[in-house]
Image (tube, rainbow, N blue to C red):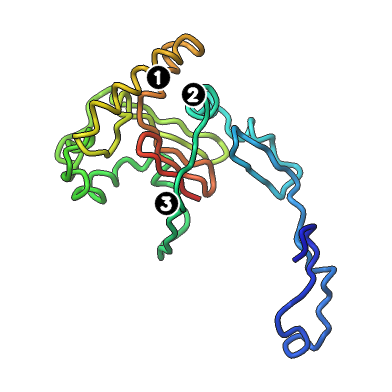
Amino acid sequence: YGNTGELQAVPFDKEVYGGLLDKCKNSLHEVAKVENYNGFIYGCFDENSPSFSDYLGDLKWFLDPYFEHSGGLELIGPPARCLIRANWKCPAENFVGDAYHVGWTHASALRTGESVFTPLAGNSTPPTEGLGLQVTSKFGSGLGVLWDAYAGIHDSSLINDMMQWATIKEQQLAEKIGADRARIYRSHLNTTIFPNNSFLTGSGVFKT
């Protein structure tokens, strides 16, 4: 393909297609809508789709403290790639709010290092009331908030430093966006922007 989307060449065009492949009809389709959300580029092929802001719905209220008001994010290091034999909806659901899987699937990791989530290992201890909240949108996106758990799954040796830094950031944000939303930054979020953009704040994991 050329840098404007036209199909320019196909391997073994004559041998496989007999030279009859119509390159014009097989060019790339133009993305109908492209929006920049604080440095993240989202595209949609449906020109009748809602705006990205409307697509996020109430999630934007929770995400903006991280992506907009905090001063932005920087992704560091090369990406890690893996293939998983699974229904594509399973990982999306995990990040939207499948809290049940955490205690079992990640039990061994939770018991290593004594993170703030260690009590959840093996689902041996039921979550306490008011531990967090869950938000979903009508378009399939969703997130879960674990209050004051910015340190996430990190080792106990890092918890104090991480929470001290997050507390300073929370105080700074409170002056801009209020105490309630600033507390979100100090917390842990598991999120999926449907269908395939998932991330954990605090833990610093972004997946597509």
Q: Position of residue 102 (x, y in %)?
A: 28, 44
Residue, disc 2: 70
* Residue 60, x across and y down, in percent: 55, 28
* Marked residue nearer the N-terminal end (3 or 2): 2
Secondary structure at badge 1 equals helix
Given contact means CB atoms under 8 Å apart, are the residues at marks 1 and 2 in contact? yes
Q: Quadrant of residue 161?
A: top left
Tags 3 and 1 touching, CB below 8 Å: no
Give the amino acid type for the residue marked by disc 1 in the picture.
Lys
Q: Could you say where residue 24 lies in the image, as x and y percent from the top left?
A: 85, 68
Of helix, strand and loop, which one carries label 3?
A: helix
**Vertical comparison of 2 with 177: above or below:** below
The residue under the point 52% across, 23% down is: 61
Q: Residue at x 37, y 29 (%)?
A: 145
Tell me the crowding category of disc 2: few under 14, some 14 to 19, or many 20 or more residues within 10 angstroms, Cα based.
some
- Which quarter of the rendered picture does the N terminus lie within? bottom right
Q: Which residue occupies the extreme front position in the image?
A: 77
The residue at which mark 3 appears reads as 91
In the picture, the disc for residue 169 is 1
Q: As rendered, which of 88 and 34 lies closer to the eye? A: 34
Residue 66 is left or right of residue 103, and the answer is right
* Three-letter code for the amino acid on which mark 2 is drawn: Ser
Which is more N-terminal, label 1 or label 3? 3
